[in-house]
Image: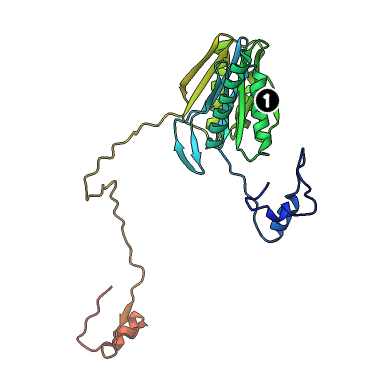
Amino acid sequence: MLFPFSARKANTSADFVGLRSGFNFINCRRNAELLSKGYEPPKAIKTGTSIVGIIYKDGVILGADTRATEGPIVSDKNCSKIHHLQDHIYCCGAGTAADTEMITLTTSAELDLHRLNTERRVPVVCASMMLRRTLFRYQGHIGAALVMGGVDTTGPQLYCIYPCGSNDKIPYAAMGSGTLAAMSVLEHGWKPDLDLEQGKQLVREAISAGVFNDLGSGSNIDLCVITAKGAVYLRTDTIASEKGERLGKYGIKPNSTMVTSISVLSLQVTDERIYAVDDQQPGTSGVQLDSQQADEELPEGSQTKSP
């Protein structure tokens, strides 16, 4: 559904016959009619984030920046974008902060129920399936782009899940507004046999590239290392953009202005003009006269002064 309007008329159309399974397009005609009447469709909101995930030799490493924005305003400088799903499954979220927070909390609760019901460790593909089904059910209206990683009996796995419900299973992924810069670093430096320190450094460089090339990303870098033994969440692992130090001293006394420089200009008089003002008619504009004419018209004994 494209518009938050009532669909009573659409439900009473001839095309609607009881309940249907699968896709339902009964609102397409209504949406076209609303467009013809001048209603504007909802516009996509640009969000700023850089999230990265890679598979290294022993597991998965996830990374994210910590800046949360509201348009041009930085609303939070230390926002946590790496969410816990299970002890061996974590997820990075880009998009609307409320959507990423709620969908990960809901999926985490569903995975807990699945673990208690089956009495076994939840596979990573199961978490991916739950997230994809929820996102596809809402047809992209949940603004959550996710990079999910985990380690189970089949080994390390990394999924890139889009808001529309599609996904990619790839060895390295980047999402958010800093995707282009981060992906260029990953494509250049990723190798299948990376060790832990090399993998962490690669994720730091990818997030830093997104931070310095995108105004929506910034502040610190969070990392999460997932192995078969468990996960280690490294909060504020690196400070990507440090605050600059003030170099000058700006101690100015109140009600005073600092004089930084004094310069004296030599003026050369190139022209002299005299303006006569009629005293009997105040308010009227004076007549501009040349110096010679002014000397002739002034009475005897009067003095001329240069302006």
Q: Report helix, strand or loop for mark 1.
A: helix
Q: Is residue 152 left or right of residue 262?
A: right
Q: Is residue 254 left or right of residue 62?
A: left
Q: Quadrant of the C terminus?
A: bottom left
Residue 206 seen in the figure: no
Of 176 and 154, the residue lying toward us:
154
Of 213 and 82, the residue lying toward us:
82
Residue most toward the left? 301
Instruction: Give coordinates of residue 47: x percent, y percent.
Output: 56, 39
Q: Which residue is drawn at the image coordinates 53% and 25% (left, top)?
A: 82
Number of numbered tags placed on the structure image:
1
Of 177 and 144, the residue lying toward us:
144
Instruction: Give coordinates of residue 75: x percent, y percent.
Output: 45, 39
Give the image quarter of residue 181: top right
Q: Quick check: 152 above or below 181?
A: above
Q: How is the image coloured?
A: rainbow
Q: Which residue is drawn at the image coordinates 30% and 87% (left, top)?
A: 296
Q: Amino acid at mark 1?
A: Met
Instruction: Give coordinates of residue 232: x percent, y percent.
Output: 51, 15
Residue 66 seen in the figure: yes
Give the image quarter of residue 284: bottom left
Q: Which residue does the numbered mark 1 point to in the structure image?
A: 129
Of 5 and 170, the residue lying toward us:
5
Q: Determine crowd level at label 1: few under 14, some 14-19, many 20+ residues with C-alpha closer than 10 A.
A: few
Q: Quick check: 3 above or below 224?
A: below
Instruction: Give coordinates of residue 295: x percent, y percent.
Output: 29, 84
Q: Which residue is drawn at the image coordinates 77% and 38% (left, top)?
A: 21
Q: Which residue is drawn at the image coordinates 32% and 61% (left, top)?
A: 267
